[in-house]
Image: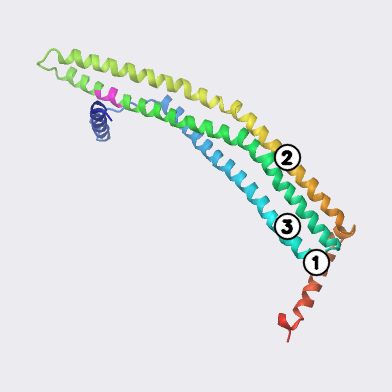
Amino acid sequence: MSWTGFKKGISRAGTSLLQKTGQIERTVDREFADEEVKYKTFEKECQALQKAAKGYSDAMKAMTATQGRLADTIDVFYSAADKASESAMAAHAYKRAVDDLDTGIGRELEAPYRTTVMEPLGKINAIFPVVNEQINKRNHKLLDYDAARSKLNKLIAKPSDDPTKLPRAQAEHDEAKEVFDMLNEQLISELPQLLDLRIPYFDPGFEAMIRMQCKFAEEGYEKLGGVQRYFADNVRDDYAGGQLDAQVESVLQEMRELTICGAS
């Protein structure tokens, strides 16, 4: 920070303190305040959206990776018992389907998702620090304006013996007001425009996200649906009728009756 910037910072800190104690009047612009609230809400929502979008991508990759480990274990489990059984063939088919889905995540979802969803979100979130810098600059110029107005009003109320002080204070006031008004009006005009552009900006990414989710779901249904042909035709009806539950309980009871499982 330059020496001039340091002195301005000290002066503004003093002005802010005097405003808190009521010694200098604070300018309140309701129109700007309303637009700033809406902008800050938009900024917060975009940051939350970027975080949630990354969480979704991470969750999808974690899910398919977990499915892969589950399929590996099931395949080994059934193959060790009887490789020629229908259950072993179903387990192997499940493993192939899950492996295909895991590969498809990278091919059909991960790269396109990064390009159409994550990168646009990153770009719009990169805009906010620039806008915030303009808002901070506007607030600094407002402090300069309030300080200059207070100084001018004091000289008007109590004229100085130095005839050059009042014209100089008037010039400082007019310059500070002009700079502040320019920044303030620019923000009041352009903050709503920024918010209005969010819908056409997000539309393509939103549509792409839905299409990718649909494609992944359709492929999952198709590939996993193919595993069902290894099961007997009556399995689904037996499950709906509760017969499979009874079968599981019957086998579990046989296990409990084994001495090593605690049978007395």
Residue 245 has which mark? 1
**CA distance for labels 2 and 3:** 23 Å
What crowding class fits label 2: few (fewer than 14 Cα within 10 Å), some (14-19), or many (20 or more)?
A: few
What crowding class fits label 3: few (fewer than 14 Cα within 10 Å), some (14-19), or many (20 or more)?
A: many
What crowding class fits label 1: few (fewer than 14 Cα within 10 Å), some (14-19), or many (20 or more)?
A: few
Tag 1, which secondary structure? helix
Q: List the single residue furthest toward the bottom.
A: 264
**Horizontally, is 199 left or right of 78 in the view?**
left
Q: Amino acid at mark 3?
A: Ala
Q: Amino acid at mark 1?
A: Asp
Is 146 colored magenta in this rendering? yes
Q: Residue at x 35, y 28 (%)?
A: 139
Residue 232: in sight, yes or no? yes
| Foreground tag (2 vs 3) | 3
Color style of the picture? rainbow
Residue 71 has which mark? 3
Position of the N terminus by quadrant: top left
- Which residue lies under the disc numbered 2? 214
**Horizontally, is 50 left or right of 231 in the view?**
left
Tag 2, which secondary structure? helix
**CA distance for labels 1 and 3:** 23 Å
- Give coordinates of residue 248: x percent, y percent: 80, 69
Residue 38: in sight, yes or no? no
- Give coordinates of residue 122: x percent, y percent: 53, 34
